[in-house]
Image: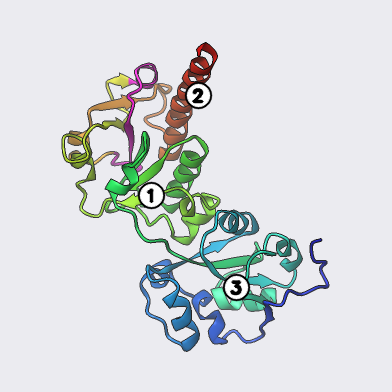
């Protein structure tokens, strides 16, 4: 039986002081500070020991519920009194501290209105290497220089929904665990496997290097291959490569590509939003893969 609104879990701790050290990780911190910052109090030392690779914040009931269901290492939760009842059922298995605060205090702590009523402090996982990401994978997405956090979050959400095995994040692409990325992706950036291409050489290694065997497909308005041709001749292992709004794919990335693929659009438009491009391409590839799978199972 779930707890009623009048019941409080043993780990639900009412707080009334914005300067309480237990709220320090939530207090006006940037995403980079949470990732890199050293602890400033005994409470934070304990939390940081459980998060050797840094921390990030997740906002909203659905996102936090998804992370907890996936077994993400949630360290603590800050709840507003008005929204606490809605969270108690999915937090029933969570044994970490739940800090119960007023909406006014929550806004004072984080520096903006907390409309969603819940935030979770989560330990960053150990970063994967590009080589680890390729294990047992057949479809990856590469983000080249995409600094817009909403686009990154949207692409991750689509990639998770349409069967991509993981995402390679280029050196200058926004951190997928920044707050807005996590929120826009509905938690996908913390659930779908990804790796940072820190040195910018992962594509070269996938194309003729030690991790060879992949077809590198750049999506670009000036591509000479159509998406439908790619769908009909889908390689067994492929990387879909997406560039930033405006500049598109970088010169080095374009040189690494085996082919450049375009999506036909109307004459009055010059390009699609990068998240929309990812959604269209992944949907068509997923539909073909799923169709082939159904056909294969029916003919066995």
Q: Eyeballing the image, is 22 above or below 171?
A: below
- What whole-number distance in Å separates the C-alpha atoms at marks 3 and 2? 40 Å
Crowdedness near tag 3: few (<14), some (14–19) or many (≥20) residues, C-alpha within 10 Å: some
- What whole-number distance in Å separates the C-alpha atoms at marks 1 and 3? 26 Å
SS for dot 3? loop
**Of the two numbered discs 1 and 3 in the rendering, the one whose residue sits closer to the viewer:** 3
Residue that badge 1 annotates: 194
Q: Residue at x 48, y 77 (%)?
A: 47
Crowdedness near tag 2: few (<14), some (14–19) or many (≥20) residues, C-alpha within 10 Å: few
Q: Point out the tag, 3 or 2, that comes first from the N-terminus.
A: 3
Q: Residue at x 59, y 66 (%)?
A: 119
Residue 145 visible, this angle: no
Residue 66 visible, this angle: yes
- What whole-number distance in Å separates the C-alpha atoms at marks 1 and 2? 23 Å
Confirm whether the magenta stretch covers residue 121: no
As rendered, which of 92 and 55 lies closer to the eye? Answer: 92
Q: Are marks 3 and 2 in contact (CB under 8 Å)?
A: no
SS for dot 2? helix
Where does the magenta region start and end? 226-248
Q: Point out the tag, 1 or 3, that comes first from the N-terminus.
A: 3
For residue 290, the mark is 2
Residue that badge 3 annotates: 96
Q: In which quadrant is the N terminus drawn? A: bottom right
Q: In x, y percent, where is residue 207?
A: 20, 35
For residue 80, the mark is none
Q: In x, y percent, where is residue 225?
A: 30, 20
């Amino acid at each position: 039986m779930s707890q009623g609104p009048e019941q409080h879990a043993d780990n639900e701790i009412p707080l009334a002081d914005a300067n309480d050290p237990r709220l320090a990780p939530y207090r006006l911190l940037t995403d980079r500070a949470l990732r890199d910052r050293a602890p400033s109090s005994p409470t934070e030392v304990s939390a940081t020991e459980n998060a050797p690779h840094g921390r990030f914040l997740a906002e909203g009931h659905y996102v936090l519920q998804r992370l907890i269901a996936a077994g993400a290492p949630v360290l603590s939760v800050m709840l507003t009194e008005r929204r606490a009842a809605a969270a108690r059922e999915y937090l029933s298995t969570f044994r970490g501290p739940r800090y119960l605060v007023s909406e006014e205090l929550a806004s004072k702590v984080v520096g903006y209105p907390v409309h969603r009523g819940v935030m979770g402090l989560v330990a960053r996982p150990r970063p994967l290497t590009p080589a680890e990401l390729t294990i047992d994978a057949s479809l990856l997405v590469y983000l080249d220089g995409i600094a817009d956090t909403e686009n990154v979050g949207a692409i991750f959400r689509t990639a998770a929904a349409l069967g991509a095995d993981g995402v390679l994040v280029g050196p200058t692409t926004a951190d997928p665990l920044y707050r807005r990325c996590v929120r826009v992706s509905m938690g996908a950036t913390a659930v779908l496997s990804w790796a940072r291409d820190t040195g910018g050489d992962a594509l070269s290694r996938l194309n003729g290097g030690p991790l060879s065997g992949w077809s590198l497909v750049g999506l670009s308005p000036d591509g000479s291959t159509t998406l439908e041709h790619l769908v009909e001749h889908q390689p067994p292992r492929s990387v879909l490569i997406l560039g930033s709004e405006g500049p598109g794919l970088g010169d080095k990335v374009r040189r690494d590509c085996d082919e450049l693929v375009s999506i036909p659009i109307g004459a009055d438009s010059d390009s699609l939003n990068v998240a929309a491009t990812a959604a269209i391409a992944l949907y068509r590839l997923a539909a073909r893969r799923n169709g082939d799978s159904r056909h294969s199972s029916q003919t066995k």
